[in-house]
Image (tube, helix red, strand yellow):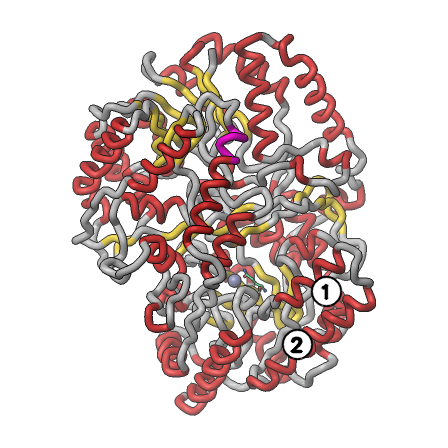
Amino acid sequence: MVTTHNLGFPRIGAKRELKFGLESYWKGLSDQETLTSLAAQLRALHWQQQSVLDFIPVGDFSFYDQVLDMSFTLGNVPERVSGREGIALDNYFRVARGRSAGDSDCSCVHAGEMTKWFDTNYHYIVPEFTADTAFNLDASRLLAQIEESRAQGHQIKPVIIGPVSYLWLGKSKDASDRLALLERLLPVYAELLNALSEAGVTWVQIDEPVLVTELSAEWKHAFTLAYHHLKSTPVQLLLATYFGALQDNLQLTCELPVAGLHLDAISAQDEVSRVIDWLPAHKVLSLGVINGRNVWKTDLNATLEWLIPVYQKLSSRLWLAPSCSLLHVPVDLGVETQLDTEVSNWLAFALQKLEELQVLATALNKGRASVEAELTENAEAIASRRNSRRVHNAKVKSAVAELDSAWGQRASDYAQRATKQGKLLNLPAFPTTTIGSFPQTTEIRQARQQFRAGRLNTADYTTLMQKEIQRCVEEQEALGLDVLVHGEAERNDMVEYFGEQLEGYIFSQFGWVQSYGSRCVKPPIIYGDIARPSAMTVTWTGYAQSLTQKPMKGMLTGPVTILNWSFVRDDQPRATTCYQLALAIREEVLELEKSGVQIIQIDEAALREGLPLRKSQWQSYLDWAVASFRIAANGVKDETQIHTHMCYSEFNDIIQAIADMDADVITIETSRSDMELLDVFDDFRYPNEIGPGVYDIHSPNIPSETQVVKLMKKAAQRIPVERLWVNPDCGLKTRQWDEVRPALKNMVAAAQALRKAY
Ligand code: GLN
Ligand code: ZN
């Protein structure tokens, strides 16, 4: 018999119940009891929904982030919050967000750094280390959830992050070698595994996704050390790898002394037979055969055909699972009532993926005949997608075929463009601007929802949005900003907004995926060739420009970001889809320019996150990603100033690609790095203009004028002042007006002080 299991389940809730619970707690509108009982309800529901599996995951639920949970389990809590009185959960939120429910300003601390979880759009809170970091087990969260799930009668498998990945994911705050902490860390892991065993646990899933990345000899050695140390643990370890192939770590991984290995058989299908050869005969091999990163139905017949010989070899040593945690896909296709039925028949969300898993397992365990109907239905869905006219657009395909490098080339180089733009725009030194969005107030959200639901007609909706734009413009005028934005009130999301106006896209109602904490995104789904039937932003931008003499920045999302934040097709290369998007955005850019817009910002917030996990594959990604941006941006005349924006980015290893994009101005997130991020631009002699973010928009803390001046002075040590802009780290949509107003006021005052100082 094959064993089925799951690596992790989305915790946010099919209707984002956890998000709303968290936010109401943070606002002080509900108490801890309400929040914890909501969490228990969600866990109970999710376990019950997974209960057809032989093992369900426990410990994958999190109030904010599973890596932060692990930090608390290991007692690695930053000093700035330890020793505080009060509820533990509040300290947890302080690390996550800088403050917790009911914190008065004086109890704010700086939030833990957040970064991308591998190549996904999930962000985790980076563990902080110093040479003195000590670990101390606190298994209470896991033990409580184990007890809870047992009481509900489930067969469970706790999920933890493995010691090597835990260290690898963290950051040393004092330049000490974090790997040196392994020795101190391992006894705590051993203690944890003992505690789990005492709680009656037999299998523990220990996630070591860093095994799919390029590891130095030291890190490889750390694996050997760690798992030999944990060898005598009383529980059986299922070492989970995902998001890629093991490649040169394959032998190492297979030889680690654990009871089982999980391999992502979607991205590492080619490795399965080698793994089977290498894997000692007593070990379980779990194959992730259902894609946990996309929303497409699995071709069950093809998968089954491939699995049968594998099963013959492994028999009961074979386990089946999704490729990775289902955290990265929406919960339930079943709650979607408005999807186009043809396309929705091609889709599978988390619950449907588990059903697929069940069909495969049943076919292997009981024979094909027992699931004949399901397999036939699946074959029909797969064929319908492959042959659908909705997917293929000949005009778009031939436009992509005609692309060459001339499409991405501007007429003149940056220096010449800058002179022309300077004359036209006539901006002061240290020009101030924002990244695009302004607070999305309740009224704005309500108006959009009502419009969508058909309760507000187009005329009334337009009037409401125009009012918001007007308010936003007036606020910016009053603040004295130099380059204004319309505020993005009409946009639910920077990708969905564009996707909705493009052909080849479909939208779910509840297809939310957690991005960080309570923040979710609803990635639109690209199912077919991309075309732009009409202008997407020109009217709103034009209206905003009509209200002011100051330059109004047109605001677009770039092709690479649209791609990386969408669920994409799995039937053509990502590059091809990206070029299709680039052509669509290019048409928009040119139409904005034609309408008189002088500055156009094309956000590429997600450029870096599209990087493949392995460096050896970076260049080919960067080649087509940069080419796509250039196709989108560079059709304009010299006088038109192109901005781009990137957040959460490290630039050191992609600075050449960033420079190759050749945007006139780039705004980036730098405040949390204290401007250190600019060193790479300095060292590289980055030739164009830069707006290093001067304050962190993820935290409600308001920067003072002095802080901003100080940061900009640091920036000025690295970048010539005539090429510096002053702006926040990112868009302001998640903030309140009474946070934004004083923050920008101080920012503008700082820019004025800087103009005097230089
Ligand atoms: N223009 C977008 C905004 O301001 C950019 C958001 C982002 O970079 N994530 O909201
Ligand atoms: Zn940003």
Q: Is residue 33 left or right of residue 165?
A: right
Q: Dividing the image into 4 quarters, which one contains the C terminus?
A: bottom left
Quarter assignment of residue 240 = top left
SS under mark 2 = loop
Please tell me which residue lies in front, 339 or 272. 339
Badge number at residue 592: none
Please tell me which residue lies in front, 328 or 562. 328
Quadrant of the picture in which ligand 1 is shown: bottom right
Q: Amino acid at mark 1?
A: Thr
SS under mark 1 = loop
What range of the chain is rendered magenta? 45-50
The residue drawn where x is 79% and y is 38% is 390
Q: Amino acid at mark 2?
A: Met
Q: Is residue 512 left or right of residue 41?
A: right
The residue drawn where x is 42% and y is 38% is 60
The residue drawn where x is 51% and y is 70% is 688
**Residue 597 locus on image (x, y percent):** 70, 74
**Residue 729 locus on image (x, y percent):** 47, 68
Sequence order check, earlier mark of 2 and 1: 1
Q: Is residue 391 left or right of residue 320?
A: right
Alpha carbons under labels 2 and 1: distance apart: 13 Å
Residues packed near mark 2 inside 10 Å, few (<14), some (14 to 19) or many (20 plus) = many
Q: Is residue 91 above or below residue 670?
A: above
- Residue corresponding to mark 1: 537
The secondary structure making up most of the magenta span is: helix
Please tell me which residue lies in front, 521 or 595. 521
- Residue corresponding to mark 2: 552
Q: Is residue 753 visible?
A: yes
Residues packed near mark 1 inside 10 Å, few (<14), some (14 to 19) or many (20 plus) = many
**Residue 224 locus on image (x, y percent):** 24, 30
